[in-house]
Image (tube, rainbow, N blue to C red):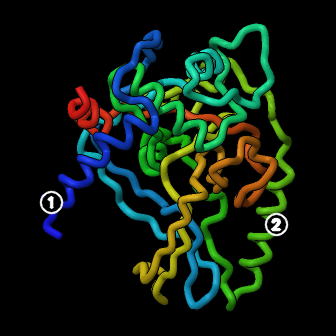
Amino acid sequence: MPHHVAEAIIGAVAAVAVPAAIGLVDWAGPVPGAVETVAIAPGAIDFPLPGEFLADGRPAAAPSRNVRFDRPLHIMADQVSRAAYGECVAAGGCRPADDAPSASTSDIPVTGVSYLDAEAYAVWYSRATGETWRLPSAAEWAFAAGERFAGDPFAVADDPKNPAVAWIRRYEEEAAARREPDPQPKPRGHYGPNAHGVRDMAGNVWEWTSTCYSRVKLDAALETIEHTTENCGVHVAEGRHRTYMSDFVRDGKSGGCAVGAPPDNLGFRLVRDDTPGWFARLQALVR
């Protein structure tokens, strides 16, 4: 099928089905307050790829790739707060979070939210503001985190020719698993800004990203990807270390695919697309 025909069909279906499904034709509710964003200048990072990597059937170290960002990245300076998330709940766009209520919620990040909850908030917030907001990819999150990005805690694979490597890795994993939990979310700014001015990266709230979990087969040189299987029922969450969580999980301690201690909390922040994305094009179609 020619590309332009396929695009026209997809556009027509979206114009009818998506507004009917999630009520995007008009937004009559209150407009949320403006959030502070940080514009990170274009640049590049050496990014260790997320996922499970195998070579000759054995675990392998994740390869790194140079990822370049040619446009500024506009990301929320803070994680989405309980108060902001509560606006989405009140408007009927989000499910209530599982985090414990407190007397003051305006500067506490929302926790006890799943990937699905974060996606629902992004849809609602985009609809309410008329802008396009979404979860960052794992690479975008790493770029925004700067010097606070940790990635996978143990990227060096076991060396079958050197048992000491395997022993050291197991020791480090066990030590990481003994990290004292820190479950109480802290007020905004508790962990301070990073070099970009983004606050509380890699604190005690791990953040959902839009990147799916992948199982990757590498060649013998551990550089070339021969095959990738994506599982988008599991997504990457970044924080003090990288973790992989099922989309419905709200409590990181209840299940995931992470080495070391599980996430203390699961939350999120969004990035803004300043170029017209799917939401802006959809709005143009239905008005």
In this rendering, position of residue 245 left or right of residue 274: right
* Element marked by disc 1: helix
Instruction: Residue at 53%, 24% (x, y): give it.
Output: 78
* Three-letter residue code for mark 2: Tyr
* Element marked by disc 2: helix
Q: In this figure, which residue is indicated by the disc labeled 2? A: 171
**In x, y percent, where is residue 121?**
53, 30
Of 10 and 46, the residue lying toward us: 10
Res. 43 image quadrant: top left
Q: Give the mark nearest the N terminus, 2 or 1.
A: 1
* Three-letter residue code for mark 1: Val
Which of label 2 and label 1 is nearer to you?
1
In this rendering, position of residue 120 left or right of residue 166: left
Of 215 and 157, the residue lying toward us: 215
Work out whether 55 lies above or below 276: below
Separation (CA) of disc 2 from disc 1:
57 Å
Instruction: Residue at 76%, 40% (x, y): give it.
Output: 264
**In x, y percent, where is residue 76?**
46, 27
Q: In this figure, which residue is indicated by the disc labeled 1? A: 5
What is the quadrant of the C terminus in the image? top left
